[in-house]
Amino acid sequence: MECKIERNKKICNCSYEPCEKKGICCECLHYHRKRGELPACYFTPEIEATYDRSVKRFISMHQGKK
């Protein structure tokens, strides 16, 4: 399967501009998983901008939503 990097970049909400993995979702996911984090696309733009990509932050973001 061919990676659609340019298409992925258009929908990527990562605000970390020097990111080498932007648009290369499989690399981004593996990078954050190794660090016990989730990638930017799991978060709202406001929370993503804090760079707190922790699982704890993800859960707190969704608590109370049903």
Image (cartoon, rainbow, N blue to C red):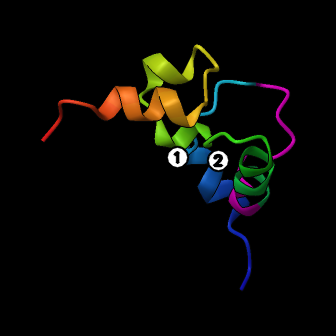
Q: Is residue 63 above or below residue 46?
A: below
Instruction: Between residue 5 and residue 60, name the one nearer to us.
Output: 60
Q: Residue at x 37, y 26 (%)?
A: 60
Q: x and y percent of residue 7 in the render?
A: 60, 58
Q: Which residue is mark 2?
A: 9
Q: CA distance from mark 1 to mark 2?
A: 5 Å
Q: Which residues are magenta?
A: 17-26
Where is residue 3 drawn, in percent x and y? 73, 71
Given residues 60 and 25, the one toward you in this image is 60
Name which residue lies at 60% across and 31% down. Answer: 54
- The residue that appears at 50% across and 30% down in the rendered structure is 56
Asked whether, in this view, residue 13 is left or right of residue 66, the answer is: right
Residue type, numbered disc 2: Lys
Residue that appears at 46% across and 24% down: 45
Instruction: Give yes or no for residue 18 being in the magenta stretch.
Output: yes
Helix, strand or loop: magenta stretch = loop
Q: Are marks 1 and 2 in contact (CB under 8 Å)?
A: yes
Name the residue furthest left.
66
The residue carrying mark 1 is: 11
